[in-house]
Amino acid sequence: MLAKSQNIPTLKYGTVTEPVAASVQQMAHKNLTVAECRLFILPEHVYAATSPDHLILLTCWREGLLEVKCPLSAINKPVDNVNVAYLQVTDGKTGLKHGSQVRYQTGVTD
């Protein structure tokens, strides 16, 4: 399965660019530590599992999750709701159209 997915251009692009994007986040915030993570399983519901891209620790705040999106559709273009289908603008701020993935990950890892 993994060998087949490596031939899908969007997945290949994400695999190459995600680590770069995570390191840029770490460099942008001097009090931020970014760490890779593995699978989290909710002990009381073993069918509920998630694997966020990274864990973060912001020394002046708390720990959290970093979900990195590197859309191939926005290569050499602005990352906005025009070039990335899963983004929306609300009150002048760009965010995920459906944040259910992030909410689910937060619930399982909390």
Image (cartoon, helix red, strand yellow):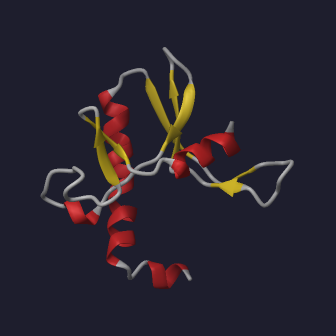
Determine the residue positioned at 42% across, 78% down.
Answer: 6
Percent from the top left, x then y, of residue 42?
78, 48
Depth check, front residue: 69 or 83 = 83
Based on the displayed image, in which of its 4 quarters is residue 17 positioned? Answer: bottom left
Residue at the extreme front: 91
Percent from the top left, x then y, of residue 45?
83, 53
Left or right: residue 110 compared with residue 57: right
Where is the C terminus found, in terms of image quarters? top right
Residue at the extreme top: 60
Residue at the extreme right: 44
Left or right: residue 52 compared with residue 46: left
Percent from the top left, x then y, of residue 50?
64, 54
Question: Relative to 14, does residue 97 appear above or below in the rendering?
Answer: above
Where is the N terminus found, in terms of image quarters? bottom right
Left or right: residue 62 compared with residue 34: right
Based on the displayed image, in which of its 4 quarters is residue 51 positioned? Answer: bottom right
Left or right: residue 76 compared with residue 23: left
Determine the residue positioned at 54% across, 52% down.
Answer: 101
Question: Relative to 71, does residue 109 appear above or below in the rendering?
Answer: above
Number of numbered discs visible in the structure rendering? 0
Determine the residue positioned at 57% across, 28% down.
Answer: 63
Depth check, front residue: 90 or 48 = 90
